[in-house]
Amino acid sequence: SSRATPQESSGTSPSSQPAALPNPPRAPLWQRFLREVILETLLPAWLVITFVAIPVGVRGESMNPTLSTGDYLIVLKTERWLSAWGIRPEYVSRGDIIVTKAPPDNPASSEPLPSYLESLPVLGLFNWDFLRDLRFRPYLIKRVIGVPGDTVEVKAGIVYISGAKLTETYTSAARGVDDAPVTVVRDGTFYIMGDNRTRGSSLDSRAFRLVR
């Protein structure tokens, strides 16, 4: 018997091979931008930081010795949204560390914009003097001391909840002798304080009362 050649064994010839298909046309630039930048990158990132969690850096010493400048936290947002949607009404307990803002109607709640903004290269191209007059309400990292239904009082640096001394193992060794008047914690609000109880080290509910 004779040996079959590759051409004979396959039963095809080079001329019978299928022609390569042309590349599909590229989508317009605006469609690629919408898909790759908006839908595949920015939208998922926004959903995560809005509804799931966000990293937060610590600046200041008001939470010493628990937290210090340069520390980072992962702030979970899921429980907050579950509460807002009525699925889980109460999600904050006494002793929790939360991120919040001071009430907008209190003068102690705002501060000037950070001075380092003036040193940014892009800002040097313009006259940004008006920034010096602007103020903003920074986010605060504090510990929940009083929850709805509590009566909070601070006497000589000691915290009392509904007349009973609050045991705190997380505070700084040094304590001030600050006093704060009796405050009844209303529904939907909280009484917060920094762990650093050295006089003047923490701007908290002793100055601006309750937060939401």
Image (cartoon, grey):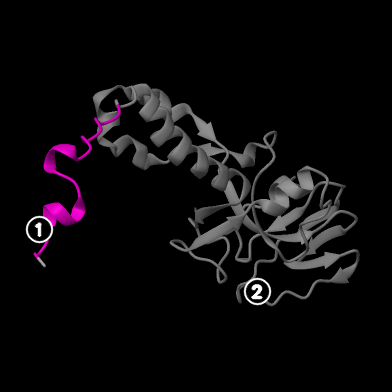
Q: CA distance from mark 1 to mark 2?
A: 86 Å
- Mark 2: give few (<14), some (14-19) or many (20+) Cα within 10 Å: some
Residue 73 as seen in the image, left or right of residue 126: right
- Of pointers 1 and 2, the one earlier in the residue sequence: 1
Residues 101 and 30: in front is 30
Can residue 209 be seen from the camera position used here? no
The residue tagged with tag 1: helix, strand or loop?
loop
174 displayed left or right of 122: right
| Front-most of residues 202 and 212 | 212
Residues 73 and 65: in front is: 73
Q: Is residue 165 above or below residue 187?
A: below
Residue 18 highlighted magenta (yes or no): yes
User: Which segment is the magenta one?
Assistant: 2-24
Picture quadrant of residue 164: bottom right
Residue at label 2?
Answer: 170
Is 91 a magenta residue? no
Identify which residue is drawn at 12% across, 42% down. Answer: 14
The residue type indicated by label 2 comes to: Tyr
Residue 120 occupies quadrant: top left
